[in-house]
Image (spheres, coloured by chain):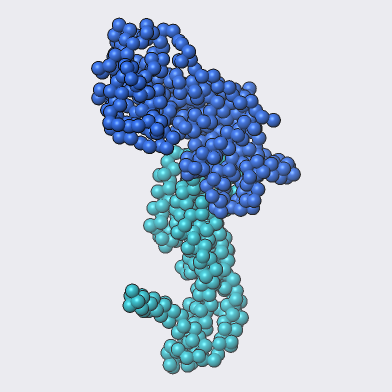
């Protein structure tokens, strides 16, 4: 159990390729941090630097009170779960769990006790004498997690552990990882490219793009106040609609349509406007509305995604399946649900005064049970 | 469909016949008396002298000095074959381990240097090798017989390809589990390579067992004679009106064939596994 401090860490590969650019993250003791981003954003590299599988080019990583830049991976007091499980194929499940402990000269009785405890927690007791080959993907992933748990490390590192599982199993394993982490209260660093996984697991998530941190925040903060167009389009499904707009005299102009901002315009001039699919509503009678030309509809069961365009700019709207669809739609959006970004830098533009609807929704970290 | 099946079997039977017939002829001929063979040539019938011939071959003290029996020769061949196979596996595994898992400058270059020696058969370096062994006074020793031939490009190549196919995460997991380079090799790589080792073992055992030129050169003491040399020794007596002991030569040939055949039969399953599938 320990806090992890990543301070201005960079990874420079041979040939001056900078995969991670001066990243700093403070991870509290017991916190579940998810690193999320598209492939090649440096998230795995960062994790592997914490694990000690890659050298740290610049900056320092501290686990507990120790700077571990030059510490051997085995001495860092961490455990890692790999995407392809990386179980030792020739060892039984028991030996897989026990191997790390044996190498640390743990007494036999202690090993037995810890393996039994981990096996019970992960419900893999019936398979202890089997080889990994005889297990399903989900069971193998449990064993891989068991191998991490038995060590009782200061931190868990997860490298896309659920990517090789099928969709249904992924959801249940996701829940299990979360439950387990809360129960053990072990500081965790989790890498994924799946924004849904990131949203559901994280106490705080770190959105990475091109080796830089785009945003650090609690999932709902990131969802409701994305710091850039990148975050806006990456977090949330469907992705946030981004359309071109213009602010003139305090009013927003999107194509033909003018929306009154009520004196809280962030800037004057061109802006990128972000609209969440679920924030766009069908306009009631007599309301100011924009004409939404329907292109095609995706039925999700609980939701219906309508793809189309407003004045030539593509958008997606999430509607309830009960809503009757008849040709083109008249849609409207609450002013306080609009997001503004600079068209040049993609950075979020804050509005002059914040008001209720714009405030981040508070999420409380669940306290560690027992 | 049915017709092609018959055709397939005809081909297979033909293959089996071509492969097995000479062995059968040799075995049958070996049960006749030397004089019969000299008169009638090869034979397909049972000669009825099986026990005598094979007993003689195995126990008679032959050669010029009369201190080597067929059984001793078999033992020598076995030492040579096993020494070859085991030594080559150990050496080439270690070489491949270094090439794949340790970053040192020019690793690829060194690999290709090793690899190109595949093109050079033993015969190319037989004189310098002999010279070295002679200077070290290792002629007429098992060490001299085995050690100079242990470096194996084939083995190194196979193990290198195999190690490269082992996922990197396994090494990383082992590192985090506190296994150093030596532990990783012994605890993970060696057990994973079992099928590969069996495959290489067969190839190298047969190779060592069948060595003729190198033992001939290295050992003058008849106590070190191998089976393969023994066969030739029998035929060497053809001087004057002596009839060579054809039956004994055939019997020795059959005996010389047995251990490699047994090794292949025993390890066959592993052999195929090692060369075709990877146990990861």
Task: Chain A: give its colour.
Answer: blue
Looking at the image, residue A28 lies above or below residue B146: above
Taking the image as shown, residue A198 lies to the left or right of residue A325, namely right
> For the image shown, how many numbered marks are present on the structure?
0
Percent coordinates x, y for residue B86 in the rendering? 56, 59
Image quadrant where residue B62 sits: bottom right
Q: Residue A276 versus residue A110: which sits nearer the camera?
A: A276
Q: Residue B91 versus residue A64: which sits nearer the camera?
A: A64
Percent coordinates x, y for residue A164 in the rendering? 48, 43
Taking the image as shown, residue A284 lies to the left or right of residue B63, namely left
The reply to whether residue A45 is visible in this rendering is no
The reply to whether residue A117 is visible in this rendering is yes
Image quadrant where residue B73 sits: bottom right
Question: Which residue is depicted at the point 44% across and 19% down?
Answer: A225
Percent coordinates x, y for residue B181 in the rendering? 57, 42
Task: Chain B: give its colour.
Answer: cyan
Image quadrant where residue B25 sits: bottom left
Question: Which residue is depicted at the point 57% across and 73% down?
Answer: B74
Question: Which residue is depicted at the point 41% across and 52% down?
Answer: B115
């Amino acid at each position: 159990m320990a806090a992890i401090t990543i301070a201005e860490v960079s990874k420079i590969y041979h040939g001056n390729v900078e995969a991670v650019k001066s990243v700093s993250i403070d991870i509290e003791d017991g916190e579940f941090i998810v690193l999320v981003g598209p492939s090649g954003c440096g998230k795995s590299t960062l994790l592997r630097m914490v694990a000690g599988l890659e050298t740290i080019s610049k900056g320092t990583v501290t686990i507990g009170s120790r700077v571990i830049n030059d510490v051997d991976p085995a001495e860092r007091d961490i455990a890692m779960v790999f995407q392809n499980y990386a179980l030792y194929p020739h060892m039984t499940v028991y030996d897989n769990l026990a191997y790390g402990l044996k190498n640390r000269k743990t007494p036999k009785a202690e090993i037995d006790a810890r393996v039994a405890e981990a096996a019970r927690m992960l419900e893999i007791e019936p398979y202890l004498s089997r080889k990994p080959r005889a297990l399903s993907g989900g069971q193998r992933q449990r064993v891989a997690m068991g191998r991490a748990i038995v060590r009782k490390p200061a931190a868990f590192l997860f490298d896309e552990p659920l990517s090789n599982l099928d969709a249904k199993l992924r959801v249940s394993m996701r829940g299990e990882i979360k439950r387990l982490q809360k129960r053990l209260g072990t500081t965790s660093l989790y890498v994924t490219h799946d924004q849904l996984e990131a949203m559901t697991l994280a106490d705080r998530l770190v959105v990475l793009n091109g080796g830089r941190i785009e945003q650090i925040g609690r999932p709902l903060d990131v969802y409701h106040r994305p710091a850039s167009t990148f975050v806006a389009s990456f977090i949330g499904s469907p992705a946030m609609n981004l359309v071109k707009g213009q602010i003139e005299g305090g009013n927003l102009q999107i194509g033909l349509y003018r929306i009154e901002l009520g004196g809280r315009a962030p800037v004057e001039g061109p802006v990128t406007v972000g609209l969440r699919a679920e924030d766009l509503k069908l306009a009631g009678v007599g309301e100011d509305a924009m004409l939404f030309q329907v292109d095609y509809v995706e039925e999700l069961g609980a939701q219906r995604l309508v793809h189309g365009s407003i004045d030539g700019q593509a958008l997606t709207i999430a509607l309830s399946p009960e809503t009757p669809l008849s040709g083109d739609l008249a849609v409207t959006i609450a002013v306080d649900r609009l997001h503004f970004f600079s068209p040049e830098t993609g950075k979020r533009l804050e509005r002059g005064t914040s008001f209720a609807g714009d405030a981040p929704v508070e999420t409380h970290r669940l306290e560690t049970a027992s | 469909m049915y017709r092609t099946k018959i055709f397939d079997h005809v081909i297979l039977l033909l293959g089996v016949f071509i492969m097995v017939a000479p062995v059968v002829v040799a075995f049958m001929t070996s049960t006749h008396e030397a004089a019969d063979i000299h008169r009638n040539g090869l034979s397909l019938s049972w000669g009825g002298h099986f026990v005598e011939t094979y007993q003689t071959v195995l126990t008679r003290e032959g050669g010029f000095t009369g201190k080597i029996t067929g059984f001793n020769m078999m033992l020598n061949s076995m030492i040579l074959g096993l020494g070859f196979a085991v030594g080559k596996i150990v050496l080439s595994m270690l070489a491949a381990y270094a090439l794949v898992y340790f970053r040192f400058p020019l690793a690829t270059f060194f690999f290709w240097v090793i690899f190109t020696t595949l093109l050079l058969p033993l015969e190319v370096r037989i004189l310098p090798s002999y010279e070295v062994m002679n200077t070290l006074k290792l002629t007429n020793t098992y060490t001299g017989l085995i050690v100079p031939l242990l470096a194996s490009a084939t083995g190194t190549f196979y193990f290198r390809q195999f190690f490269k196919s082992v996922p990197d995460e396994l090494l990383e997991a082992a590192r985090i589990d506190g296994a150093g380079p030596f532990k990783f090799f012994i605890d993970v790589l060696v057990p994973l390579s079992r099928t590969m080792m069996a495959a290489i073992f067969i190839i190298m055992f047969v190779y060592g067992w069948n060595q003729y030129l190198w033992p001939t050169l290295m050992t003058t003491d008849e106590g070190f004679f191998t089976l393969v040399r023994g066969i030739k020794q029998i035929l060497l007596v053809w001087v004057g009106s002596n009839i060579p002991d054809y039956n004994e030569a055939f019997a020795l040939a059959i005996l010389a064939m047995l251990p490699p055949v047994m090794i292949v039969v025993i390890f066959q399953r592993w052999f195929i596994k090692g060369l075709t599938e990877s146990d990861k």
